[in-house]
Amino acid sequence: MIKSNCHCCCRSVAVKSDNVSKIFQDAMDAGKGILRLTPTWVPRVFMQPGRRIKLAPTDWYALGVDRGGINERWFSSTTEAGNPGRQPDEGLSYVKFNGQKFLLRDTVTEGKGTVVGDNIWDKYKRWPVYSKFFDDLGPLFHHLHQREEHAKLVGQEGKPEAYYFPPQLNAAENFFDYTFMGFEPGTTKDDVKKCLENWNKGDNGILDLSKAYRLKRGTGWIVPAGVLHAPGSLCTYEPQWGSDVFGSFQSLVERRQVEWSWLVKDVPPDKHHDLDYIISMLDWEKNVDPYFKNTNYIEPIVDEKQSGDGYTDKWITYGKIDGKQLFSAKEITVFPGCKCTLHDGGASGWIFVQGHGKVGDLTVDTPVMINYGAEPNDELFVTATAAKNGVTIENNGSEPLVALRYFGPDAHPSTPDIGDHRKLNAEK
């Protein structure tokens, strides 16, 4: 039995999928297309909680030590977590309304284009992206997320992702605020194969082939599928494709063993010891790119069209991956006593990281501490219907009201290109 230390006495009652129709429409009408979501906590057995995503200290292991510490919170997710021993709804977000809750995944199925937009529904038949807070005490292993051609062999989808390091959640850097990415130019596939062959000899030396980058609050990165990366210990906001595939290429992290099974978790069974196949999952050219930082590092860019007196809207995830706008993200800041109306190009998932105010008719605030199972008012899903009509945000608190929001594919006619921040800095 799973035990929870939740002290909340007003947890919503779950509604079964076949009974969602009426309550979904009532919630849409009441919020004028803006839906409240409950926190979606995800444990990882191979990580140590970073303690900055506001989960109460009593609840870091709310699902049991054997399931691992909770160091991720997923936002507006219709993607299941790929964890062994997972709960049936692990990774899935819930909408809450009038003391009841129902899966966002069922909401999308029910509302289709009115929820996610006609283009997304027609092409994907789901909300194909999600975002999360990743919060680890130290570094994670050097790993990749499979590209589409490899992920589909195990019934999954490839997963590119992006990083942004919110200042509000990074007062502490924790133990290792550097991220290894890719390989040093000149690295060969035989070098990598030797590391895999040395898996059971201790540290297999994969980081000797890589380069670490210092992480900087208020900046971010794009990480294409097939690129090795060992995330550092800054708390990270991660817009990404709706998949939970990965494979670790590192055998030892901070003296902790990484089992071979974490390398081949999303590899066809007949390829579990096929080193040539495993290495083929790497996007080789991207991994040895001598200009990796120029190609993948980003800094916020103010969207002048959606900024004004008392509010600033910034691009924090932007650009294309392999020529496609797969996801994007922005940070809106509204100063005390001010309000604005945003006109976005599509549906979006929101998380508030500072302040108190209103979005439409819904009150939002940012809690200091959240017990597992509690339902604070800091997360929203803005449907395509609401986005089309415009969303008004008002700060009626005493500090800036700040929200991060991410979008699905092709939500904008255009975004800045990766590297545009350097051009803007050069012009100043």
Image (spheres, rainbow, N blue to C red):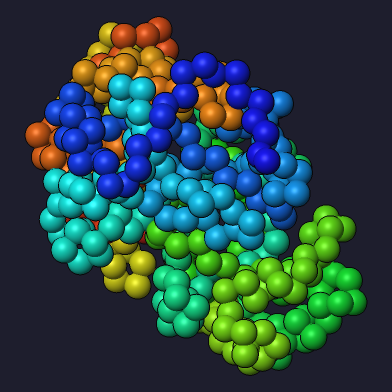
Residue at 51 percent of width and 61 percent of height? 244
**Quadrant position of the C terminus in the picture:** top left
Which quarter of the picture shows residue 196?
bottom right
Position of 377 relative to 68 (above/below): above
The front one of 95 and 386 is 95
Residue furthest right as drawn: 201
| Residue 197 pos. (x, y %) | 79, 85
172 relative to 343 in the view: left or right:
right
Give the answer, above or below, for where 244 lies relative to 349.
Answer: below
Q: Place residue 5 in its image quadrant.
A: top right
In the image, what residue occupies the spot 19% across and 58% down? 121
Residue 391, percent across and down? 18, 29
Task: Say which of 298 and 130 sits in front.
Answer: 130
Q: Quadrant of the N terminus?
A: top right
For image coordinates 64% across by 30% down, the residue present is 4
Where does the image place residue 154, in percent across and percent down from the top left? 50, 78
Q: Residue at x 35, y 37 (%)?
A: 15
